[in-house]
């Protein structure tokens, strides 16, 4: 099982009516043949399962993909002194990560934003 490089770009929303390629995430995670995040492979490869949040006008943030006790997926950023630095993938446990699909992430500020999967390599 190899780690896939998944690029997510902001889909259309109220702030970006055309979406934005300058706002998104690069997620590195193992996927099943169907395109779901593979929890068993993640346990073996977790050190290589990272996320980078890129947001135009802000510095990139780098963290790790983690699997919560409730069975959900989250992005944990290595921000010292900030216990609330996680961002949660909305139903990532059931979503498919294939080009053209959409996923949602609840960001730091509590906003739930939708992102399009633009590449899986």
Image (cartoon, rainbow, N blue to C red):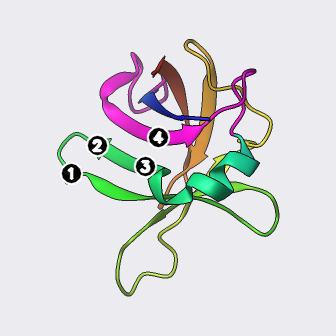
State which mark lies toward you, 1 or 4: 4
- In the rendering, at what x and y percent does residue 62 appear? 34, 57
Is 6 magenta? The answer is no
Q: Mark 2 points at which residue?
A: 55
Q: Which mark is residue 58?
A: 1
Report the Cα–Cα distance between label 4 and label 3.
4 Å
Q: Name the residue under label 3.
A: 51
> Do callouts 1 and 2 mark residues in contact (Cβ within 8 Å)?
yes
Report the Cα–Cα distance between label 2 and label 3.
13 Å
| First in residue order: circle 2 vs circle 4 | 4
Q: Which secondary structure, mark 1? A: loop
Q: How crowded is mark 2: few (under 14 residues within 10 Å), some or many (20 or more)?
A: some
State which mark lies toward you, 1 or 3: 3
Q: Which mark is residue 27?
A: 4
- Image check: 18 left or right of 112? left
- Image check: 97 left or right of 16? right
Q: Which secondary structure, mark 2? A: strand
| First in residue order: circle 1 vs circle 3 | 3
Q: Is the residue 19 above or below the residue 67 in the image?
A: above
Please tell me which residue lies in front, 56 or 32: 32
């Amino acid at each position: 099982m190899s780690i896939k490089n998944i690029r997510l770009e902001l889909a259309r929303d109220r702030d970006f009516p055309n979406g934005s390629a300058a706002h998104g995430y690069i997620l590195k995670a193992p996927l099943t043949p169907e395109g779901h995040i593979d929890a068993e492979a993640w346990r073996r490869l977790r050190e290589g399962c990272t996320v980078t949040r890129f947001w135009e006008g802000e510095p990139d943030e780098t963290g790790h993909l983690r699997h919560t006790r409730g069975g959900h997926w989250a992005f944990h950023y290595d921000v010292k002194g900030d216990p609330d630095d996680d961002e949660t993938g909305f139903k990532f446990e059931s979503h498919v990560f294939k080009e053209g699909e959409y996923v949602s992430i609840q960001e730091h500020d509590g906003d739930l934003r939708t992102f399009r999967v633009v590449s899986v390599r």
